[in-house]
Amino acid sequence: MAEATQQTATPQQPQDDDVVGKAYDGRLMRRLLTYLRPYKLIAAVSLVAILLKAGLDVLGPYLFKVALDLYLTPRFSHLSPQEQASTHSFLSRYLSTDAARGVTELAALYMGSLTLSYLLEFAQTYVLQWMGQKVMFDMRRQIFGHMQRMHIGFFDKNPVGRLVTRLTSDVDALNEMFTSGIFAIFEDVFVLIGIVAVMLSMSWWLALLTFSVLPLILLITRIFRKYVRESYRRIRAAVARINAYTQEHISGMPLVQLFNRQERAYRDFEEINAVHMVAFKDSILAYALYYPGVELLSTVAIALVIWIGGSGVLRGTVTLGVLVAFIQYSQRFFRPIQDLSEKYNILQAAMAASERVFKLLDSEPEIASPAGVSTPTSQTEAGTIEFREVWFTYQKLTAEQQALAQQNGPAALAAMRDVEWILRGVSFVVNANETAAIVGHTGAGKTTIISLMMRFYDVQHGAVLIDGVDVRAQDLHALRSRFGVVLQDPFLFSGTIESNIRMGSPITTERVREAAEEVNLLDFIEQQPAGFQELLRERGAGLSTGQKQLINFARALAHDPAVLILDEATSSVDTDTELKVRSALERMVTGRTSVLIAHRLSTVQRADVILVMHKGQLREQGPHQQLLSERGLYWKLYQLQYRDQETGAAGEAFAPKLGTVVGEPAADPTDSSEQGAVALGSD
């Protein structure tokens, strides 16, 4: 996309949102025209309508010329035979020799041309707008479908606002090009060609006199385009900043009000809004100077025609009909020039928009189903999870680093000081129908592990296997359909409660109801006026975090996944909701492989295997009692967590109740003996 002029982007806006491209790029235009192929018949009809309308626009003044010269002015006997012949036209043989009747015929012809021009204008406008909407529909469908195929890492690097702009503003700019750009340019060009041809055929020297102001018009048009281009660039950048700032502050309005930042936020918004206003005012000034300037020069051209042409009429070298026709043609000649200047801006915006859209469409997903997979893996398989010497980073390794890794293996990976490894040589196995828990400090790589299971990212070294098959060799749809995931931040879509649980899957209504009952959500749903058909607002606004999380639990359970993943699923809910969830967990994990991520160790004690992560490495693994008896990292984490709980609960007065949290009498947290540690964690 090097053909587009790159402008300096503001810090708040990505650079490619600020691109101002050429007014015409043949490579991009050819690609854009492919969207017209399904509607080529409609486009051809529109083009024919444009040609006919352009001809009718040129015909009007010529009819005035014929009426004046044939019927409304006396013959000039002193004209030469050649000049006398010029007063006649190809219409003379079809018109009546009677003046009154001839004028009536010309008036009827003129009225017919106006009526036909109106009908053609209607047909052209309707057809073009219809085609534009179809093209927009196709393009937006293609863009949205493409974004859904992109890997998760793509969305980590591309802000939501930028992607939404591709679907909205950029596609709108392309629609304007199809409806008011390309075809309108054809009409303006055809009208200009027709007017020039008729004027030159009637009187070449009067035509050249009319065209004498064109150099000045072209000069101010070039200046106008330059300033409007710059102001449009600033307007687009300002609008992007306004959208980004507004979206961020509306989403964070509770914090704005909590910290009393209303005045500060208002002033910041006022500054951004002022930049947009100034840029728009500059655009208005350019238009306010340009259009009157063109009108002034066109008036000068008309004045010259009246002055010089009028003298010719008095001398008998030009007929009155030619003079009147030239005045009308001069008025019509400069309108397409003004329109072409406006179409230049439309084309320029469309080229920049198309470059951004095609850059998105040309972005290939880094993670896709392998081409050789024809039969999806069955969703009913056991769900064994295995990590084999997995090294992973969110950074993209260079070709040289990848070559070193292939040659020297983990030793070369560990030697890469400029790479921030999230996982370092992680290996473990979670057998089918087992419950595994992953614990560790923030940033230890817990969530990354589950992302690799579902192949949201690909590992740089090693392998992730589900039921003995590398996830890179499995069909993505089949692989991910086997997982049910409940995240720490519950996400709900606009729609009904049932649609949020069903998520478009062919799940029976009875199964949806059973899932809601199993997670203790049914009572809440039945209290709603519309029950399962109760409409939810954006992101479940109006529901508590606990209620939203229970809906997410029901969603995961309703799909009967082979592998259930709970990523800090109970950390942000209230105590009552957490008790409801915990009572449902035993039913949820039965008969399926489960992976729990939690900071609160009390929620993972009954897991079959606990994986202890520290700085991207798997430091310990085993059941709860075994890890405590080893007096390693897990033992330290356990002691620290319960010591903090005791301190926060006013010390020893609360200590006797500690055991009720985990189901055992409390032990002395300062006891460093193995017996004391085991007492703390016994089931």
Image (cartoon, rainbow, N blue to C red):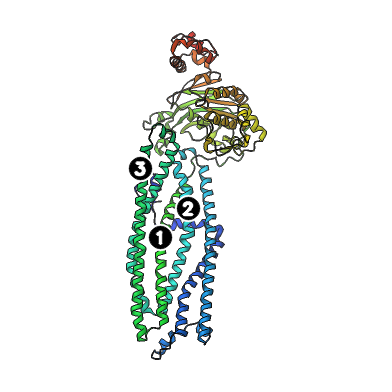
- Which is more N-terminal, label 2 or label 1? 2
Q: Position of residue 340 (x, y in %)?
A: 41, 63
Mark number for residue 453? none
Residue position marked by numbered label 1 in the rendering: 344
Q: Name above or below for residue 1 compared with residue 631.
A: below
- Which is more N-terminal, label 3 or label 1? 3
Amino acid at pointer 1: Tyr
Residue at 54 percent across and 52 percent down: it is 137
Q: Position of residue 394 (x, y in %)?
A: 43, 34
Q: Name above or below for residue 97 compared with residue 133.
A: below
Is 142 positioned to the left or the right of 293 in the image? right
Could you tell me how far apart the alpha carbons at marks 3 and 2 are, in whole angstroms?
25 Å
Amino acid at pointer 3: Pro
Q: Between residue 227 and residue 540, name the one nearer to us.
A: 540
Q: Name above or below for residue 344 compared with residue 369.
A: below
Q: Between residue 428 and residue 306, name the one nearer to us.
A: 306
Could you tell me how far apart the alpha carbons at marks 1 and 2 are, in whole angstroms?
16 Å
Count of marks overlaid on the render: 3
The reply to whether residue 6 is visible in this rendering is no
Residue position marked by numbered label 3 in the rendering: 11
Circle 1/circle 2 CB separation < 8 Å: no
Amino acid at pointer 2: Asp
